Amino acid sequence: MMNSTNRPGMNEMVNELKARFNVEEVTFVQDHEAHVDLHRKDLHEALTYMKQNGFRQLSAVTCIDWPNEKIFQLIFNIYDWSKGNRFIFRVKIDREEAMFTTITNIYGGAKYYEREVHEFFGVVFEGNDSALKQLFLEQWDDLPPLRKDFDSRAYSDRKYVKREYKTSFGEKGGEPFERN
Amino acid sequence: MAKKANIKKDKVKKIVIDKSKSIIDAPSGMFSDKINEPFAHEMIVSKDRSENLTPKQRKRKWKSMANYFSANSLWMLMYCTGCCAIELPQAMTSRYDMERLGMGPMATPRQADILLITGYLSLKTLRRLIYTYEQMSEPKYVVGFGPCTLNGGIYHDSHAVINQLDQYVPIDLYIAGCMPKPEAVMNGFQDLIDLIEVGEATGWKDYHARYEWYKQNQKEALGEVMIHDEFHE
């Protein structure tokens, strides 16, 4: 982790962001990559500003579940092809009422990323109605599966038939392994 | 060199059809040794003998011949589901050369004989797989690769991946290994050919016989087998 970098464009961009928006924390992961923790109300303006200043590509939108803090952390990964710089914006939203305004009017490609985040975490993106449709999981009938409180094994045990074995291959079952 | 030439000549002589004796005088060893059934020696069709056969015996004879020919010309559907599919290029290309077993790739399920299930299957894939399997013309055979098709493998506790494939479609042969090496793949294909030759690869008959049971399992896991595809609706 670094506090600053000599990479052209990076420090200037961070200073600009700090001056304009409510930036909570900036971490440099590599000399061309920075994590920026923003307040959620500033994200759309910040993304618009970044897009006007060379960051034309949205590489990914994803989410992290923090059940103890009761928040979802949304992650927006943007890239500048002219300088090779990458910024990762992180905002926190409430876990109980997981709502966020869509960014599809800034980056059109976010349509499917938002749909994926909705499917796996249950975050609703206002303004992107297509995000409510199913994408990977067809006819899903449980909690969104990438939430931490979803028990994958219990779901698998309940839904899929398991093969039964006469011998137990666990730690205590089966024959002990002898070393010379 | 001279000896080799002699052997070749002998082989050629054996295949020559002697019209006075029989319709086809096949060289010994042309048919698999595994056919140890009493009718196996009658594979060489004799004009006189065929008239003495009962209709049932004649049917069995034709069936065994059909098995022999279908075992030696298997087309496999190129539908790769999981990571074991990466072992197929080696098995197909010059080093192991699948084509010497008479196997070749086929792009459409309607003309394919074998369905290779190469690894794990998510529910979304399973829906498409059932569609594909039911489109294939009979006789059809299914080969399961790796432990994922057997008991879920390393994905046994995943919410997305089914555990036992033989609950949903009948499997004729499993190939062990995670992933199976090309040697194992070739060995498995040879075993499948042997099974077909003796008429023991009867998974597709089982699918007819226990159709209700298979459909029940499919519905339990999938909810609905029907595919709702937004890009085609």
Image (tube, coloured by chain):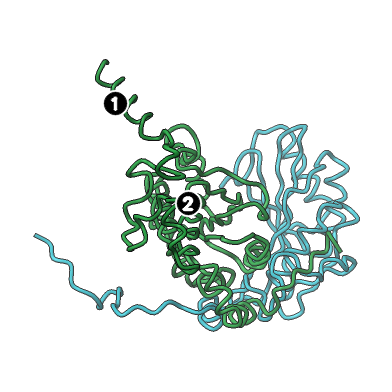
**Location of the N terminus of chain B (image quadrant):** top left
The quadrant in which residue B191 appears is: bottom left
**Location of the C terminus of chain B (image quadrant):** bottom right
- The answer to whether residue B206 is seen in the rendering is yes
Q: Amino acid at mark 2?
A: Ala
Residue in front for this viewpoint, B219 or A78: B219
| Residue A150 left/right relative to A47 | left
Q: Estimate the spatial distance between the alpha carbons at disc 2 and disc 1, rounded to whole Å.
A: 27 Å
Question: Circle 2 — which element?
Answer: helix
Please give the residue where the numbered disc 1 appears in the rendered image.
B7
Residue drawn at 82 percent across, 42 percent down? A56
Query: How many residues crowd around disc 1 within 10 Å: few (fewer than 14), some, or many (20 or more)?
Result: few
Vertical order, A161 against B73 (above or below):
below
Residue drawn at 70 percent across, 65 percent down? A136
Residue in front for this viewpoint, B149 or A155: B149
The quadrant in which residue A131 appears is: bottom right
**Residue A36's spot in the image, x, y percent?**
70, 53
Query: Which chain is assigned green?
Result: B
* Chain A shade in the render: cyan
The quadrant in which residue A63 appears is: bottom right
In front: mark 2 or mark 1? 1
**Residue B4's spot in the image, x, y percent?**
28, 21
Question: Circle 1 — which element?
Answer: helix
Q: Amino acid at mark 1?
A: Ile
- Precedes in sequence: disc 2 or disc 1: 1
| Residue A27 left/right relative to B17 | right
Contact between marks 2 and 1 (CB within 8 A): the answer is no
Residue in front for this viewpoint, A114 or B145: B145
Residue drawn at 57 percent across, 82 percent down? B213
Please give the residue where the numbered disc 2 appears in the rendered image.
B71
**Residue A95's spot in the image, x, y percent?**
70, 76
**Residue B221's spot in the image, x, y percent?**
61, 78
